[in-house]
Amino acid sequence: MKFPGSKLLRRFDLAAQASSLEDLLRSSRASAFTGLVELSHDGAIGLIFYYIGAEVNALYRTGGNASSGAAALDGMREAAQLGGATVSVFELPLDLAYLMRGLTRRQRLPEEVRSRSDLQELLRRLEKAEHTGTLEAQGASGSAVVLLVRGRVSNAYFESADAQTYEQAEARAKLEEAAAAGLGQPFLGEFSREAWKTRHEVRVPMESRLQRADPRAPEAVTEEMAARRAALDALAVEAPGLRQAFLLDLLTGVVLGRSGRSTGDVNVGGLVEMLPPLLLELRARVEGTDGAESLEFVEISTERLTILAAVVSETQEAMVLVADRSQPAALLSAALQRVIRGYSGRAAITRRDVLPSS
């Protein structure tokens, strides 16, 4: 599935990555992930909805049977153990995820939207009613979600039939084009205005609603976040000419932290944003399905920049630096490897002492 407004971070075969579903769940919690994890296997499909690192809900369907909550997670665990499971990770914007988490009374509207004027009239009625919630619509050219706060459009997301995703004004324009061909009966969801006001107060990973709380889990998350921050800070000191550095979770595709001086160079910024999907794709191609090869280190050079990426096998992450080309690559590589040794050692102690294996 692909929810409007979501971004596909990666899709992979779980067994081919030499990873388990538990590894994926743990990475999603540790990275404070917000979005959807989809697992499909031999006709069965499961979904886990995450909000700031917590499993908020899960659904699993196989054949004519469906389950939710903890039972759905158990079903996905069994399917993953059989091998051949495909995992897709979709990131959701925090405002959209927050609304989805707290929506009530989601219902199909009795009237159809057959034209642009019908859509405009519906939005006018919602503005007059000071509605806070979502308006969902689907037509032949794509599907959309409109976020409304006190009747005003806060944001809009549109996914076209060819899987292109649009946001804000572009999404609104696409939605109006789709309305001209008809959108059927939209769905309207309500959300508490008071709850919406508190959306920015949540800044740390939350507790799972589906799994038994481990009293050591908050300590582990705090320790891991501190270790990542310390490693990136150390890299900023040790790597001369550093532009940007970040840690990438290789299971979810989430960037766990960044450091480096800010830059107004659009070309550098765009290149940095391209690196996570590029590294994930490269790793998938190198390691393949048989796992005969493993990706350990990547070096990319441009006219102005040197890009180095090294896999931290202990945590299934990659540490990436982007530095000025004027700095010797050997010097940068040595700095990167020193920081990784310290980081992986600290992470191993945290996982052993704070969250020992059962």
Image (tube, rainbow, N blue to C red):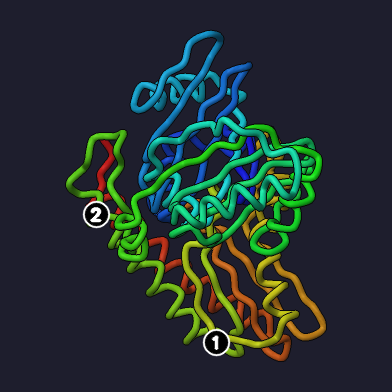
Q: Secondary structure at mark 2?
A: helix
Q: Earlier in the sequence, mark 1 or mark 2?
A: 2
Q: Quadrant of residue 100?
A: top left
**What quarter of the picture does the C terminus occupy?**
top left
* Left or right: residue 72 compared with residue 154: left
Side of 236 relative to 210 (left or right): right
In the depicted structure, whether residue 40 falls above or below residue 175: above
Residue 95 picture location, percent across and down: 47, 57
Residue 299 at x, y percent in the picture: 71, 69
Q: In the shown orientation, is residue 232 left or right of residue 211?
A: right
Give residue 141's position: percent from left, percent from top.
79, 41
- The residue where tag 2 is placed is 218
* Label 1 with label 2: CB-CB less than 8 Å: no
How many C-alpha atoms fall within 10 Å of the one at disc 1: few (<14), some, or many (≥20)?
A: few
Residue on which disc 1 sits:
261
Q: Position of residue 196 (x, y in %)?
A: 36, 57
Residue at x 74%, y 38% (from the top left corner)? 114
Q: For the point 56% across and 75% down, which residue is it?
A: 245
Is 39 or 119 nearer to us in this picture? 119
Left or right of 289 on screen, residue 44: left
Secondary structure under tag 1 reads loop
Is 22 above or below relative to 317? above
Residue type (three-letter) at the residue carrying disc 2: Pro
User: Mark 1: which amino acid?
Assistant: Arg
The quadrant of the rendering that contains the N terminus is: top right
